[in-house]
Image (spheres, rainbow, N blue to C red):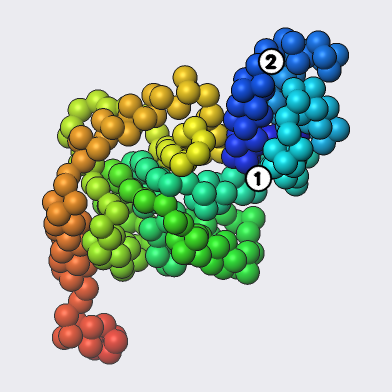
Amino acid sequence: MADTAANPRARTLASALRRARTEAGFGVREVARTLNMSHATISQWETGKRVPSPADLTAMLIAIGLPEQRQQHLLDLARDLPSARRQTPASYLDGVLECERTAAEIVEWSPLTIPDLLQTAAYATEVIGDDDALTRAEVRARVDLRLSRRAAIGAEYMALIGEWALRQRVGGVAVQVEQLKRIAKSSQVRVVPIGTGWHPGLTGPFTLYHFPDAASLAYLPHRFLYDDAEVTPYKVASARLRRLALSEADSVAFVQTVVKKLEKSAARRSPGPKQAAAARAGPSR
């Protein structure tokens, strides 16, 4: 059995397995006795924390009398799930990509930075390129992947962005201005201004994925949450942030105001034509 907590497909398999067992009228302990296993093992299969081996999965499906056609569906879900017990950042990214591909609705809260799915190439390069362990080619490849993710999304997407993310000059004024102009053209952005008092979003970023045929899940940096008891607080936080956020029109206007201030600030710092010419000529004798 493999620890697959970072793979959303494991959660889909778990939900289907639990539904098949309950529809067949079997309890967890009854199945465990039939398979000569611990009931805790069956529970882990049904929560997506672990995935059964093909042999164990087949034995369980036969034990509950699942029709052969439905057996094959579950076996297909289990195929190619990661076998490593230790999850890596890459496996979490695989999970995120799977969620983005299959979700019906995505709600992302990003208090301090522009969300990945809305980043320009220059902004993404600044963020990803901060890792000194990456070569230039690796940085370019990761930036390209980040930019390509937008095209793969078929879900309704909403980004709730904190005001600080708009004001933080990632890469300098020019990069930030380009990024904010992109944001201002998007109908998927709602700005949550500072000064609204305490709210649950202050504890950090998160993303909610809602699926048409499976339970919702939440993603925190390098961690997926599946259980309803864990996901519900983030649903509540999302609803609270929506209430605090500016309207779509007001969000666009807010972003445009920040852009104008940045451009005005940059213009004040830039030397005029005469000063620039004098600087090129060097000090007078």
Disc 2 is placed on an element classified as: loop
Is 90 positioned to the left or the right of 168 in the image?
Answer: right
Can residue 63 be seen from the camera position used here? yes
In the rendered image, residue 131, in percent from the top left (x then y), is placed at 57, 54
224 lies left or right of 64:
left
Image quadrant for the C terminus?
bottom left
The residue singled out by tag 2 in the image is 26
Query: In the rendered view, does 216 fall on the left or right side of 68?
Result: left
**Percent position of residue 271, x then y:** 20, 76
From the viewer's side, name the closer residue of 38 and 127.
38
Q: Is residue 179 above or below residue 242?
A: below
The image quadrant where one finds the N terminus is top right
What is the quadrant of residue 281 in the picture? bottom left
Disc 1 residue type (three-letter) = Ser
Residue, x 28% and y 52% (percent of image)? 189
State how far apart marks 1 and 2 are (Cα).
33 Å
Q: Which residue is mark 1?
A: 91
